[in-house]
Image (cartoon, rainbow, N blue to C red):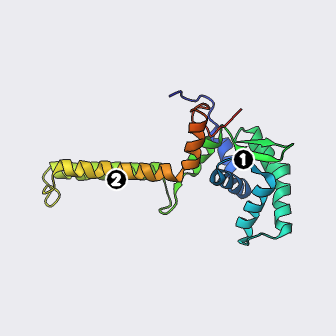
Amino acid sequence: MKLRSDILPAEQVYAILANERRRRALKQLGSVGGVVTVHELSALIAGRETGESPPPKRCRESVYTSLVQTHLPKLEELGVIEYDRESQTVEVSRHARDVALYTEVVASAGVTWSELYRALGVVSLTVLLAALLGVPLVSAIDPILLTSIALALFAAASAYQLWVNRFSVLRQLRAGGSGALGLRRHD
């Protein structure tokens, strides 16, 4: 695996995420999993903002204007999206993964993936050590069984994370892993 040397700096990621409409745009692009027109993207974002389906025309137009004039050019400049002005299409690009790392949350629990894996590791190690040190009740369970349960929990969490991120994983597989961990289809 090739390590990336062109990771988007944290300050730029924070600047991107500071705007709610940019966050919504990136979230919608990630959930679509491919190329989307600016009109489709603006309708999706306007629907989220208003809670209406279809969203009012005025709101769609407002979202469209702000995307075209401000947000999409900024995201394109930073390499987070590929924006074709001529065909009015958008898709995630090489630095989208850098931004996604700051927003990856296990939806139902509200914690990041790294927090989940860290908690699983600490709890698993603590329980295993308690069993090996003879703590009552815990030591009655075979340490191999405890280790197997911990590994099963890690496997289940990994499978769930792969399922949640299936579109970005498929994009990476289609790109043959080029783009070194980015969500890039082409440069």
Secondary structure of residue under mark 2: helix
Q: Residue furthest bottom?
A: 52
Horizontal side of 20 relative to 147 (left or right) equals: right
Query: Mark 1 packing: few (<14 Cα in 10 Å), some, or many (20+)?
Result: some
Q: Is residue 174 left or right of residue 127?
A: right
Q: Secondary structure at mark 1?
A: loop
Q: Position of residue 105 (x, y in %)?
A: 53, 55
Q: Which mark is residue 153?
A: 2
For badge 1, the amino acid type reads Val
Does residue 149 appear to the left or right of 85 in the view shown?
left
Residue at left offset 31%, top offset 48%: 151
Tell which of 86 and 153 is nearer to you.
86
Q: CA distance from mark 1 to mark 2?
A: 35 Å
Q: Residue at x 86, y 62 (%)?
A: 61
**Residue 157, percent across and down?**
41, 52
Q: Nearer the viewer, mark 1 or mark 2?
A: 1
Q: From the top left corner, tell me how far across and down residue 57 is, in percent.
A: 85, 68
**Pointer 1: what residue?**
35
> Residue at the location (55% across, 51% down)?
104
Reply above or below: 32 against 43: above
Q: Quadrant of the C terminus?
A: top right
